[in-house]
């Protein structure tokens, strides 16, 4: 009857707490890794004390990677020398088959001297990418390159203790990147 419905309605409003499932992805854990640079093993742990901007891509990327690295370069170029000494960009290649440490160094130095290019075996790169929530997949094509690599385009902001703090989406303006860097530099 109406009394039962009213009691159930009051109970539902006051006491019922249905399980809610979040559709937002969990924040990836991030963490230390060691891959290869031109000068040998390169570890995130070696950058403790610096703010790190981490990006996954590849040197043959036609437009997404150059755009992201250019935006990073613009932000880095607006830092004072003192600030710049405390910030490092890291570009991890998701195409270790073509991106040698030599090629990566040449590519990243084109953008900024504070950006290092590193890679590893396909298994090592996949493990680091998973830890940061980066995704990529080789895509066969009819182009002269033979294949492309579809990949997420996110700049990961890592604090001076090596903790993943934020993920900036593709196209984040240099002012936003600069704001994230300075927020961490001013925390010290």
Image: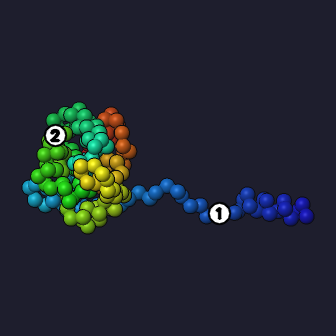
- Residue 30 in the image, given as x and y percentages of width and height: 32, 59
- Quarter where residue 108 is shown: top left
Q: Nearer the viewer, residue 177 or 128?
A: 128
Residue 45 placement (x, y as % from top left): 20, 59
Residue 110, label in figure: 2
**Colour mapping used in the image:** rainbow
Residue 169 percent across, percent down from the top left: 38, 45
Which one is in front in this view, the residue at disc 1 or the one at disc 2? 2
Q: Kindly tell me whether residue 1 is visible in this rendering.
A: yes
Q: Nearer the viewer, residue 66 or 76?
A: 66
* Front residue of this view, candidates 139 and 125: 139
Residue at 8% x, 55% y: name it.
39
**What residue lies at 19% left-to-right and 56% top-to-bottom?**
98
Q: Distance from label 1 to label 2 (Cα)?
A: 54 Å
Q: Is residue 83 above or below residue 128?
A: above
Q: 178 left or right of 26?
A: left
The answer to the question of whether label 1 and label 2 lie on touching residues, with beta carbons closer than 8 A, is no
Which quadrant of the rendered structure holds the N terminus?
A: bottom right
The answer to whether residue 188 is left or right of residue 170 is left
Q: Is residue 14 above or below residue 52?
A: below
Image position, residue 122 (x, y; %): 24, 64
Instruction: Tell me where residue 114 sits by quadrant.
Output: top left
Q: Is residue 118 visible?
A: no
Q: Secondary structure at mark 2?
A: helix
How many neighbours does mark 1 have within 10 angstroms: few (below 14), some (14-19), or many (20 or more)?
few
Q: Residue at x 36, y 39 (%)?
A: 171
The residue at which mark 1 appears reads as 18
Residue 49 got which mark?
none
């Amino acid at each position: 009857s109406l009394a039962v419905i009213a009691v159930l309605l009051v109970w539902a409003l006051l006491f019922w707490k249905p399980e809610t499932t979040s559709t937002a992805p969990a924040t990836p854990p991030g963490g230390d890794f060691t891959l290869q640079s031109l000068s040998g093993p390169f570890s995130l742990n070696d950058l403790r004390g610096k703010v790190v901007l981490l990006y996954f891509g590849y040197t043959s990327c036609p437009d997404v990677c150059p755009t992201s690295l250019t935006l990073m370069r613009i932000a880095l170029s607006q830092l004072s020398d003192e600030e710049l000494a405390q910030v490092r960009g890291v570009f991890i290649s998701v195409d270790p088959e073509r991106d040698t440490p030599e090629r990566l160094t040449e590519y990243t130095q084109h953008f900024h001297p504070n950006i290092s290019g590193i890679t590893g075996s396909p298994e090592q790169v996949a493990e680091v990418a998973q830890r940061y929530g980066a995704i990529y997949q080789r895509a066969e094509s009819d182009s002269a390159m033979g294949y492309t690599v579809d990949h997420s385009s996110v700049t990961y902001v890592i604090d001076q203790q090596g903790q993943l703090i934020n993920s900036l989406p593709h196209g984040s303006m240099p002012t936003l990147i600069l704001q994230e860097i300075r927020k961490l530099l001013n925390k010290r």
